[in-house]
Amino acid sequence: MTKTHITQAELARRWSISPRTLERWRWIGEGPRFLKIGGRVIYRLEEIEAFELRQTRSSTANAPQERATA
């Protein structure tokens, strides 16, 4: 079976960031879209990959074309 969702801890490891950063992003409406089922937060792999594509830049001078939550 192909995995289609990952946890906050798994995403934090994937991006080498703190799980608290993901929590903060959810609080301020940034980062990838997520699901909250009961008290558990999970991320769809398709949402993560779409977010990663939106973050792709060719230089540090490039501004994002849209907000990360769009």
Image (cartoon, rainbow, N blue to C red):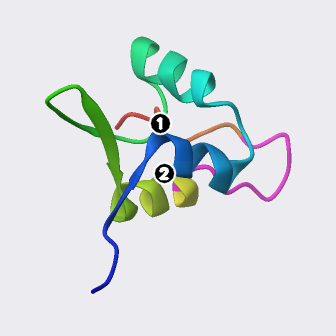
**Image spot of residue 24 (x, y percent):** 53, 16
User: In this orientation, does residue 69 appear?
Assistant: yes
Query: Residue visible at 22% across and 25% down?
Result: 39
Q: Quadrant of residue 3?
A: bottom left
Q: Which residue is mark 1?
A: 68
The dot on residue 4 is: none
- Dot 1, crowdedness within 10 Å: few (<14), some or many (≥20)? some
Q: Quadrant of residue 17?
A: top right
Amino acid at the residue labelled 1:
Ala
- Dot 2, crowdedness within 10 Å: few (<14), some or many (≥20)? some
Q: Residue 44 versus residue 58: which sits nearer the camera?
A: 44
Query: Residue visible at 41% across and 22% down?
Result: 26
In the picture as drawn, the residue positioned furthest to the right comes out as: 60
Disc 1, SS: loop
Amino acid at the residue labelled 2:
Phe
Q: Is residue 30 left or right of residue 1?
A: right
In the picture as drawn, the residue positioned furthest to the left comes out as: 38
Q: Which residue is mark 2?
A: 51
Q: Quadrant of residue 47?
A: bottom left
Q: Quadrant of the C terminus?
A: top left
Q: Residue 44 versus residue 66: which sits nearer the camera?
A: 44
Residue extent of the magenta highlight: 54-62
Q: Main secondary structure of the magenta part?
A: loop
Check contact, mark 2 vs mark 1: CB within 8 A: yes
